[in-house]
Structures are given as structure tokens and as C-alpha cells.
Amino acid sequence: MTSTKIPKALTIAGSDSGGGAGIQADIKTMSALQVYSTSVITSVTSQNTMGVDGIHELPAAFVQQQLRSVLGDIGTDAIKTGMLSSAAIISAVASTLKEFPQAAANLVVDPVMVSTSGSRLLPQDAIQAFIQDLLPLTLILTPNVPEAQVLLSLEAIQSVEDMHAAARNLASLGPRFVLLKGGHLPQTRQGSRCVVDVLYDKAKDEITEYVNHYVDTPNTHGTGCTLSAAIASELAKGEDLYQAVRTATTYIQDAIATSMDSVGKGSGPVNHFHNLRWMPYTGKSFVQAMRDALPEGLWSDFIDHPFVRGIADGTLSKDCFIYYIKQDYLYLVNYARCAALAAYKAKTIEMCAANAKIVLHIHHEMQLHLKYCEEWGISKEEVLATTESVFNVAYTRFVLDKGASGDLIDLQVAMAPCLLGYGDIGMKLYNDPATKREGNPYWKWISNYAQDDYQTAVKVGKELMEDLAIHSISTSPTRFREICDIFEQGTRLEIQFWEMSINMN
């Protein structure tokens, strides 16, 4: 029998009797991300969603014994630390990690000091040991804003600019990277609330911002534990730090968006298993599995096409963009028909209503297209009189044919490259500091696809496909392959749409 090497990650943290944070959250996260998890327990807490009402600290010598036992036999590809509840435990962990430098190379440190419910978890006399003993060994430190204030003895961090400065100051204490999380300091950009996480790379002296939509929910118990465990999991798989953070921030964003409001009476847990709905043979969500099945580089050929880059830097010719807008308006007429057909084919009123929402959004998008044309002196009548390109005809007829000849998931997947791709493009260009804003005639177009209304439509579309996949193809690899072929063909037709727009034919 041949054995497969599985990535391993170790969590050194406290136990949460409520299951939403600590060791329990770490193991759930690592398992969901397909990493073998080992653990060293530092303390046992009595807690639930309402708060922490008791902490029983384990002897530092026993914490050290656990750590040596795991690393001496199983080893690990990455380590994360959570609640280290005393100076003695912090010193014991740090000194033991020095005995296993290779295992400690990917050390993710979550400075657990205050729980989501506001309970203080790290005594004051342990902070100095944390700074002196553990931070010099750290690859990446992941504090939230209150924790950063404690570590730096600051009264307040009030802006993203303050976060930049704080991240730099924290890195001076030892870590190579600092990811300062902005969940406690939501921002408003272009009229939408968002969360900005700041990553500082000390070696490059560079700041990278990760921007996600703000999810207004009280159910955020375990967010810090989950994010740091996700970063450690991705590092264990061999991902570079930037990719690990990008994947982990997306994971926790989705976990918060699907958080559990039926667990406990207080701050409920995030959903660690949101990505396991497509478990039968991928361990990923259906949508992610479908994307991963594309030929290498094809999705990038779509969302990073020269047409898109020309929109990003404002260099795309006006004539090409006008040609695109006219053709896209004609395309959206048929796309709306497809969404209406999907509503007709839906088996439940909920699915019917979801597709109806997409139809309404398409109508809104078409009105925006007409406004673009109006600004450039092009009337609605002129748009409607435009001859439909053969590439446009090929794409719309492909989608309509899948709706007419296939079942509902065939239709939803045929529509998916447009819905998902424009969502990716909007967020990517909107958050990229290299995207030209001032004086870019296409900035309004970019902003439209990054705003809440479009991103909500993307979320609705994903949820529809996830539900359909569970009921119609979750046990059939052959059917899954057929669906992937539809998605690939739709993606290739999207690329042809860009080519058509550049060449204006």
C-alpha cells in the first residue's frame, strides 16, 4: 500500500468548552482545509457564547512535555499559537520551539488577549514574556486592533493609516510579517462598508491591504483563532505567505458570512465547514471545485485579459469600450431571459425568487450601460440598432441552449462565468492600488462590479449552484465532469467576448 504525505499543522492553544474558538476551532479549520492537525493544550476554559467564566491553566512543564512529544514523533509543517495563558507557559513554548527550529520555521502567532465577548484572557505580567521570548521566533503575528494597542501600549488605533504605522512598530518587536486585522475598525469606501486587513512585510518594507466586505453579524466567536489556523494550514501545504494570507482571509470572510446564529444565546461561532459542502470528492465548495477543474491559466486569461488591463489603467480606447458596451447590452438582454428561464425551471419558490433577484440586477446593469452610452452621446435607439456580433450570438445561444436542453444546473453553470468573472474583476481592480482612479473613464464601470449590489448577486448565484450541486450531482463524478465542461466552454466564450471587443468585429 502506498502512503500519501499529508500536510501537518500543530496548534498550541487553550480549549474552548463551547467549541467555537481555541483548540476546537483550530482543529475544525485545519480539517476543513485538508490538513492533519495535532494539538498542545495550554489551558482549559469554562465558556460558552456568553463569555468565559473560568480558566484552568495547565502546568508549564506539561505543556512542554506535550510539545516535545508531538514534535519528536509526528513533526509539523507549520505551527500556530493561540491562548498562552501565563509567562511560564510562553517561556516554555518558546524554549521548546528553539529545540525544533525546522518545525518552528512557519510559526503563526495569534496574540490571544481578549475574547470576542470582551473577556481578558492573557494576564498583564505575561505580555513582556510574549514580546521577549516568542515574537523573535515568529514568522507572522496576527493581532486585531485591541491586541495591537495592548502590545504597543497605545490608547487608540483609529484609522487605516494608524494600522499601517502599528503594523510596522509591531514588526520591530521580531516578526517577519504582521497581519493587523481590521474587523474592529470597519471602513467605508465608495459608499460600502468593508474590512481592511493590513499585512506588513518587514524584509521588503511593504504594506499590502486585503479588503473584504463587512458582514454585520454578532456571530464572530473564534474569528482570530480560525484565521490564524487557516494561515498555518496554507503554509503547511507549501503556499507562500502572501497566498496563505489571501486564502485564509477569504476562508474567514465566508465563515463569518455563513456564521451560526442557532448556537448559544450570545456571540455565536463562525461556520468552519462552509467549504465542505462539496465533500464527496473534492473537499471544496462546488464552485471552487469547478474553477479548479479549469485548464491551468484559463481563468486568469479571462479576468486578466488585455481588455481588462486596459480598463484598469484607462488606456483602453474609447471606441473599443463603446463597442463592448453596445454588445454587452445585447448580451444582457439574453442573459436576463436565461435568468428568467432559470426561475421558471426552479423547483422551489426560494430558487425562483433568487433568480428573479438576478433578473432585477441585470435590468439595473443594463440601465447603467445606457447611462455610459448617453454620457458619450449614444442613444438607446442606436444601441438597440447595433448589429449583434457573431461572437455575441455564439455565447448567448450557447447559454440559452443549455437552458433549453439541459436541467437547471446546466443553465446556472453556463451563466456562471459571466456572473463570477465580473465579480472577481470588480473586486480585483477596485482593491488594486495600481488601478487608475482619477481621470480613468472606466473607474465607474470598475466600481459598479465591486459594489454590494453586484457582489450580492454573485453570492446569490453561488448559493444557488451549491444547493443544486448537492441535490443533483454530488454523488456523480461523471455528471460533475459534464458540468465542468459547460463552465469551461462558457469561460472560453467570455474570453472571445473580450477579443471581439478589442478587435471590434
Image: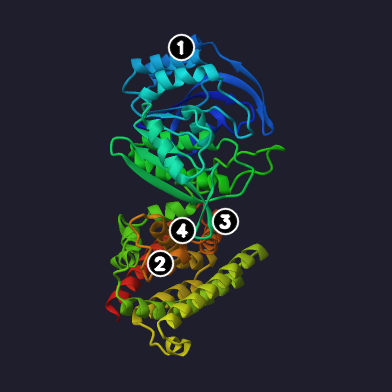
Q: Quadrant of the N terminus?
A: top left
Q: Position of residue 214 (x, y in %)?
A: 55, 50
Residue identifier under label 1: 65
Which label is found at residue 443?
2
**Numbered disc 4: secondary structure:** helix
Q: In this orientation, which residue lies closer to the viewer: 273 or 116?
A: 116
Quarter of the image where the C terminus is located: bottom left
Residue at 53% over, 57% down: 192
Q: CA distance from mark 3 to mark 2?
A: 34 Å
Residue density around tag 4, few if under 14, some if 14–19, many if 20 or more, within 10 Å: some
Compute the Cα span from label 1 to label 3.
46 Å
Label 2 Cα crowd, 10 Å radius (few <14 / some 14-19 / many 20+): some
Going 45% across and 67% down the picture, which residue do you hit?
414
Q: What is the secondary structure assignment of the residue under circle 1? A: helix
Q: Which residue is mark 3?
A: 467
Specify the quadrant of the image occupied by residue 8.
top left
Tell me the amino acid under the disc marked 2. Answer: Trp
**Mark 4 and mark 3 residues within 8 Å of each other at the beta carbon:** no
Q: Residues within 10 Å of mark 1 (few under 14, many from 20)?
A: some
What is the distance, in whole Å, between disc 2 and disc 4 at their CAs?
40 Å
Which is nearer the N-term, disc 2 or disc 4?
2
Query: Which badge, 3 or 2, is on the more N-terminal residue?
Result: 2
Q: Nearer the viewer, residue 46 or 320?
A: 320
Q: Are marks 1 and 3 in contact (CB under 8 Å)?
A: no
